[in-house]
Amino acid sequence: MSLDELKNELLSIAESCLKYAKEMKIPSAEFFVSKGSLTEIQYTKGKVKSRDGLVSGIGIQVADNQKVGFASCAGFAEDSIKSTLEQAFKIAKNRPADPRFTGFVEVNQPGKNGELDKGILDHTGEDMLSQISDAVKLTEKYDERLIGMTIASNNIWGGHAIANTNGVFEASLNTLNYCYANPVVLDKGERSTAFDVKIGRSVQDISGVVSSSVDMAMKHLGSVELGETIKVPTIWHPLTAGNFLGAVLQAGLNGATVVEKRNPLGEKLNEEIAVKELNLVDDGQDPTKISTTAIDYEGTGRRKTKVIENGVLKSFLFNDYYGKIFGIGSTGNANRQGNAEFEALPTISPTKFVMTPGTKNLEEQIEEFDKAIYMEGGLMGVGHSNFISGDFSIQAINAFLVEKGEIVKPIKPISIAGNFYKSLKDLIHIGSDITPSYLPIDTPTLTIDGHTTSG
């Protein structure tokens, strides 16, 4: 199947759904038609696991005035679609009215689709296995301290169409490939791990990920205890910074929680919440970003939204439902979660937060400090932080002590405590080395003041 054939299939199914709704005299309905392929191959300790599958289905919402019902079906069989449509209508009739619901998405201008690589469709499981095999051979150059390695490759293509009785009728496609490596090294009884990943809309190079991750793990051997609790600047590698800020910004800039009055930033629109050097957009129209599509998961055109400008909070993110309640409409940020997206109702999430880079790279930031902590790799505990208050206590696995402008030694895992929202005002540097990632946000190296570090 070609990408053009996939788009035509999605639109054809969507058109059939509209026809069935008309035949059944259903006045208001929305159809989310989805089809996607995932191939995953993972190598661990000489063993290979794989999975390969095609997932397709339709999520149907039906409105009976202000009563809304939802149902979904796997596949595109006519009988299944019709029975699911009937089920959604029955659910709507038996639900209480939602006085805030004013209808599905109206006709609007779609955005531009992201880059599509037809090579993704031709990239077979055999090709992926060959890539992994070459990457495994690459590990032979390392000494016996490398005792374990997980290498994985994932190849994804698919698309979705949205059609509703308001006249919305559009489809969008995506291609995606990502690979990651997770080595384990051991020296004199000390064990160290690391993680690196590469992701894009075309086929990625696994070998570079393997090399960088092993080098990171080796570099951390010989670590020592920090042995104290201190407040010094913390310097965050771009991927580590993204892990730190991505989750809290995704929560703090969610318009649904603003409308429901449970968002700590809800009363701070047009107020300064960060240093003046911080500029952040949700970029739904950069063709290279992995989530860029012409339409979101309700049929609103993707767009570029300024969320923080010169440190001032300028906008939250909305889907159609909450955007109408707030009074500005959708920002094109409707999403659906899960492996079978058609089974889920729309939620709100960023397409891709992108931070405007500054002027200093990692080395230049490190050079400034007599004492600091530098962190790279993964973090533990971010997801268990309090996103309402912003308080956090997390663990950095791959950390290093900085003294007199140089990284002097690796240190064992440390705890870092502070407040996410205060950190936005405690930024010392926003680096120049912005790094594309799989996370909700792309950031450069960041230096932050005010965190309590212990280990």
Image (spheres, rainbow, N blue to C red):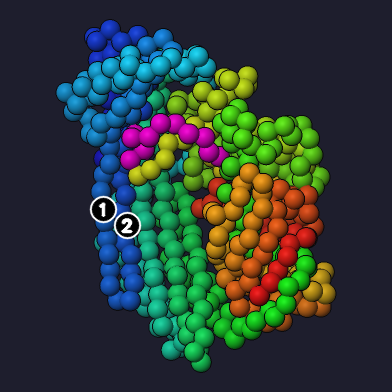
Q: Amino acid at mark 1?
A: Asp
Q: Position of residue 296 (x, y in %)?
A: 47, 31
Q: Is residue 223 in view?
A: yes
> What span is in magenta?
340-350
- Who comes first in sequence, dot 2 or dot 1? 2
**Residue closest to the eye, 26 or 91:** 91
**Residue closest to the eye, 228 or 113:** 228
134 relative position to 351: left or right: left
Q: Disc 1 marks which residue?
A: 52
Q: Is residue 329 in view?
A: no
In terms of image quadrants, where is residue 125?
bottom left
Q: Disc 2 marks which residue?
A: 40
- Cβ atoms under marks 2 and 1 closer than 8 Å: yes
322 relative position to 33: left or right: right
Q: Position of residue 309 (x, y in %)?
A: 75, 38
**Up-down: is 142 above or below 322?**
below
Magenta span contains residue 344:
yes
- Specify the quadrant that holds the C terminus: bottom right
**Up-down: is 60 above or below 165?**
below
- Specify the quadrant that holds the N terminus: top left
**Up-down: is 274 above or below 235?**
above
**Up-down: is 200 above or below 376?**
above
Q: Return the residue found at the far left.
A: 79
Q: Residue at x 19, y 26 (%)?
A: 80
Secondary structure type for disc 1: strand
